[in-house]
């Protein structure tokens, strides 16, 4: 009997101990979700993640050549027209070279002007006098040779004297011919092949100027089309390098927006012309707006946009489909913003 009483007391003590060490917690209340989950409005539709983009897509603009940025003329949100200057690179080195090349044009032109100015009137009298002297000297040498030849026949002079007189006559005739040639060249004026060479050199110098002007124009980066500056990643004083991962200026036309959605390759057959489709914004304020199919880009590739759901598969191949935003929601939407896209034919009741 005592043994059973001891067992009962021990059991009661165990229950009291368990009750003492076990905290009494209230039942947690059922909390309402902060935001209701996005639900497909179509009974037999498909859902996809889309991204807002301008109708002409974003245009990433980089520097054509490496250089120091000296001036940035646009800011985010600014409207620009095609050809407007976005930013300028340092052009001092090219401008210094342009000054040097421009000076060469005057030199080449002076050579051509000198050719047209020939012959110089003041150069002709000395040349005529030199030609007359050379001819007179040749005549004297001819008379001298005649006298020596007669003297040799009469044995009054030696054959050596005749040879010397003949050599002197040949030298005098050569000088006379040279003098007549110099006079004729001066009277004729410039030589046409010389003019052709000088003209070609002048055109070459002008071509160098044009080439430098083209290079200078490349340092002025302009807008390729009209649009709005969506992003600016450069400031004066920074060094710009072409081919960077991040464009220096992003331009887009916000007059109309489109949504680019990635549709699973298994569901792409349901996307046909005239299909009903809607877009739905994410966040605290959720708005729904109609979309119109623009085109299906006929190229399937690996999925790159993830919705954040645990069911996302990165090994899925998708086809990109572009929709036009028919009427913008009251809350603004921006290029690059994620949008839920739903495609279907029958709305659920």
Image (cartoon, grey):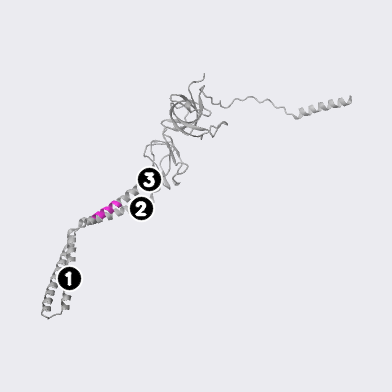
Residue for point 30% across, 52% down: 204
Question: Which residue is denoted by mark 2 in the rendering?
Answer: 97
Q: From mark 3 to mark 1, how far is it between C-alphas?
A: 67 Å
Sequence-wise, which precedes: disc 2 or disc 3?
A: 2
- Image quarter (top left, top right, bottom left or bottom right) of the N terminus: top right
Majority secondary structure in the magenta region: helix
Q: From mark 1 to mark 2, how far is it between C-alphas?
A: 56 Å
Residue for point 26% across, 53% down: 199
Q: Secondary structure at mark 3?
A: helix
In magenta segment, residue 200: yes
Closer to the camera, 346 or 173? 173
Sequence-wise, which precedes: disc 3 or disc 1?
A: 1
Disc 2 crowd, CA 10 A, few/some/many (<14, 14-19, 20+)? few
Q: Quadrant of residue 147?
A: bottom left
Closer to the camera, 268 or 81? 268
Where 156 sits versus 252, above or below? below
Q: Nearer the viewer, mark 3 or mark 1?
A: 1
Left or right of 124? Residue 241 is right
Where 335 sits versus 214, above or below? above
Specify start and end residues of the magenta stretch as a single range.
195-204
Question: Which residue is denoted by mark 1 in the rendering?
Answer: 170
Question: Which residue is denoted by mark 3 in the rendering?
Answer: 218
Q: Position of residue 104 (x, y in %)?
A: 30, 54
Q: Position of residue 15 (x, y in %)?
A: 79, 27
Disc 1 crowd, CA 10 A, few/some/many (<14, 14-19, 20+)? some
In magenta segment, residue 251: no
Number of marks drawn: 3
Where 190 sits versus 336, above or below? below
Left or right of 315? Residue 295 is left
């Amino acid at each position: 009997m005592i043994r059973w009483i001891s067992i009962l007391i021990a059991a009661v003590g165990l229950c009291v101990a368990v009750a003492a060490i076990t905290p009494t917690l209230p039942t947690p209340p059922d909390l309402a979700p902060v935001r209701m989950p996005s639900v497909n409005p179509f009974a037999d539709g498909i859902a996809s993640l889309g991204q807002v983009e301008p109708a002409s897509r974003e245009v990433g603009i980089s520097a054509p050549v490496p250089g120091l940025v000296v001036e940035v003329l646009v800011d985010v949100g600014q409207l620009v027209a095609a050809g407007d200057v976005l930013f300028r690179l340092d052009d001092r080195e090219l401008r210094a070279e342009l000054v040097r090349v421009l000076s060469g044009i005057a030199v080449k032109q002076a050579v051509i002007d000198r050719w047209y100015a020939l012959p110089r009137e003041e150069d002709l009298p000395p040349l005529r006098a030199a030609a007359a002297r050379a001819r007179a000297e040749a005549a004297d040498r001819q008379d001298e040779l005649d006298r020596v030849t007669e003297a040799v026949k009469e044995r009054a002079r030696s054959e050596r004297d005749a040879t010397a007189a003949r050599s002197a006559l040949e030298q005098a005739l050569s000088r006379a011919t040279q003098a007549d040639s110099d006079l004729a060249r001066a009277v004729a004026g410039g030589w046409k092949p010389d003019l052709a060479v000088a003209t070609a050199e002048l055109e070459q110098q002008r071509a160098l100027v044009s080439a430098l002007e083209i290079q200078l124009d490349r340092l002025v980066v302009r807008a390729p089309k009209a649009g709005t500056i969506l992003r600016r990643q450069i400031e004066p004083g920074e060094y710009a390098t072409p081919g960077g991962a991040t464009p220096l200026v992003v331009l887009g036309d916000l007059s109309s927006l489109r949504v680019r959605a990635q549709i699973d390759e298994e569901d792409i057959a349901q996307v046909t012309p005239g299909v009903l489709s809607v877009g739905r914004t994410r966040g605290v304020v959720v708005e729904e707006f109609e979309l119109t199919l623009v085109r299906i880009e006929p190229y399937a590739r690996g999925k790159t946009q993830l919705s954040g759901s645990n069911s996302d598969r990165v090994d899925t191949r998708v086809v990109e489909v572009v929709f036009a935003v028919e009427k913008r929601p009251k809350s603004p939407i921006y290029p690059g913003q994620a949008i839920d896209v739903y495609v279907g034919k029958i709305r659920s009741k």
